[in-house]
Amino acid sequence: MCFHASVVTPKGKVEERFNRAFKPGVDFDPLYHTSGFAHEELPVVGNENQIQLASWGLIPRWVKSLEDALKIRNQTLNARSETVFEKPSFRSAISEGRCLVPVTGFFEWRTVGKHKFPYHISHKEEEIFSLAGITEEWLNKETGEVMQTVSILTTAANPLMQIIHNEKLRMPVIIDRHREEEWIDPSLQQKQIELFFEPSKAPMIAKSISKLITSNTNTNVSDILTPHNYPEVEAILDSELLNEKPKEKPKIIQDSLFGS
């Protein structure tokens, strides 16, 4: 799944990349690391001509109370692409609220024995790239406050993510740059939308990082992205690759799992 992300770019650079300005009055500071369970606000790009901020964890419009809203958003950080049209929490948003979630990377853990090792995954060719999101507004009827909320779609893991996220075998849906405007086109029908749900073939870089990300201290710091190699994991990876037939080796894994 995808519960951790980074957006390490200033506001102006996000605006330049998507050729849109942030909604007036919106402030955005770069995020070295944010966890979905903290429900911080992520930038989202919809079919309107501006960038908004949305709290991570979609709250469907039909949720009545704040108590229920706070409960459901922990369960809607991600939306499985295979069932997104079936789930009551997502049916409206996938049809009417598709958006781009700009990131500079996301985080996942590789399991080796009883231990988990964190990785930061970024795009090899794009400093900022887009995850497929769905967004919806929720009205708190007690206060009159309107919250913009977002969920990130996931799909089956590609070869790189099968090595890293080797228990769940999932990854976020990544929207290729040349198809970003198509994804947020409100006229798309279900069969057209489902064509975006394939595991990404984009060239990605995955680097192991320190376990600072799991500490109880502030993890929204630049040190969180410093590469950190684990010899025990490298030894296992080398053994796995040596046991594969050469034609089956995913080159992106060899080149980028521990390299630049």
Image (spheres, rainbow, N blue to C red):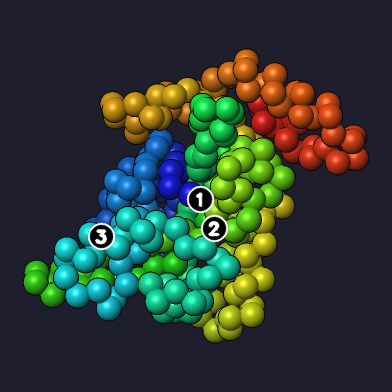
**Label 1: which secondary element:** loop
Q: Disc 1 to disc 3, how far (Cα)?
A: 19 Å
| Direction left: furthest residue | 142
At x 44%, y 67%, the residue is: 134
Where is residue 129? Give x, y as percent: 56, 51
Q: Quadrant of residue 112?
A: top right
Q: Disc 2 to disc 3, how far (Cα)?
A: 21 Å
Q: Amino acid at mark 1?
A: Met
Question: Which of marks 3 and 1 precedes in the sequence?
Answer: 1
Where is residue 92? Give x, y as percent: 41, 79
Q: Residues within 10 Å of mark 2 (few under 14, many from 20)?
A: many
Q: Is residue 32 above or below residue 77?
A: above
Question: In the rendered image, is residue 122 in sight?
Answer: no
Q: Residues within 10 Å of mark 3 (few under 14, many from 20)?
A: few
Q: Amino acid at mark 2?
A: Thr
Give the mark toward the camera: 2 or 3: 3
> Do the CB atoms of the residues marked 2 and 3 lie less than 8 Å apart?
no
Question: Which of marks 1 and 2 precedes in the sequence?
Answer: 1
At x 69%, y 32%, the residue is: 256
Q: Is residue 224 above or below residue 45?
A: above
Q: Which residue is mark 1?
A: 1
Horizontal side of residue 43 vs 255, given as left or right: left
Horizontal side of residue 218 vs 150, given as left or right: left
Q: Which residue is mark 2?
A: 154
> Do the CB atoms of the residues marked 2 and 1 lie less than 8 Å apart?
yes
Q: Quadrant of residue 199?
A: bottom right
Horizontal side of residue 34 vs 146, given as left or right: right
Q: Quadrant of residue 179?
A: bottom right
